[in-house]
Image (spheres, rainbow, N blue to C red):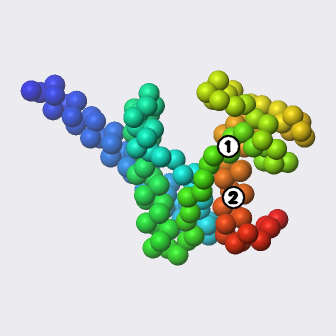
Amino acid sequence: AGKKQRVRAIHAKIANRRKDALHKLSTQLVKQYGALFVGGVNVSALAKTRMAKSVYDAGWGAFRTMLQYKSDCAGVWFEEVNEAYSSQTCSACGARSGPKGIAGLGIREWQCSVCETVHDRDINAARNILALGHERLAGGILVL
């Protein structure tokens, strides 16, 4: 019984540290920015895949919830945007020329075939999500 209690205590400590880190980061983001945009990740669907453990360990759903309620309380604009093709679309020229399909998920860097800009997949996706958020925030008016 002693080992089980120690293991339970260790897991509780890890969960509390994760929760604390998520609270601190979400509070910092809400204080720092006037608008927050996140990709509309379906956490429950991802939890049913091979990525389930990493999805739960990272606390994606909890982090999004924290961002949303803290944004509401602080008067910060919060919106989920559709992240479809965000890693495949060139953030420089808008062409959809990135790596496609499941095989494309392993490719971390790619070069746009139109403008020849080299992209890191995740940074490119983040830029595209931000641009989508700015478009929505501007109500369809082009934002520079």
Left or right, residue 87 beside residue 116: left
**Nearer the viewer's eye, disc 2 or disc 1?**
1
User: In this figure, which residue is indicated by the disc labeled 1?
Assistant: 85
Q: Circle 1 sits in a helix, a strand or a loop, which is it?
A: loop
Q: Residue furthest bottom?
A: 75
Left or right, residue 107 beside residue 96: left
Q: At 28% from the left edge and 36% from the top edge, which residue is drawn?
A: 11
Report crowding for label 1: few under 14, some 14 to 19, many 20 or more residues within 10 A (C-alpha): some
Q: What x and y, as percent, mark residue 122?
A: 66, 40
Mark 2 or mark 1: which comes first in sequence?
A: 1
Res 61 label? none
Corner quadrant of residue 143: bottom right
**Considering only vertical position in the picture, is 96 above or below 2?**
below
Q: Residue furthest left?
A: 1
Left or right, residue 112 beside residue 45: right
Which quarter shows the C terminus? bottom right
Q: Circle 2 sits in a helix, a strand or a loop, which is it?
A: helix
Left or right, residue 138 beside residue 46: right
Q: Foreground: 58 or 29?
A: 58
Q: Is residue 123 visible?
A: no
The residue under label 2 is which amino acid type?
Answer: Leu
**Considering only vertical position in the picture, is 14 above or below 127?**
above
Q: At 79% from the left edge and 37% from the top edge, which residue is drawn?
A: 97
Q: At 85% from the left edge and 48% from the top edge, which residue is drawn?
A: 93
Q: CA distance from mark 2 to mark 1?
A: 12 Å
**Considering only vertical position in the picture, is 7 above or below 14?**
above
User: In this figure, which residue is indicated by the disc labeled 2?
Assistant: 132
Corner quadrant of residue 55: top left
Q: What x and y, as percent, mark residue 18?
A: 39, 45
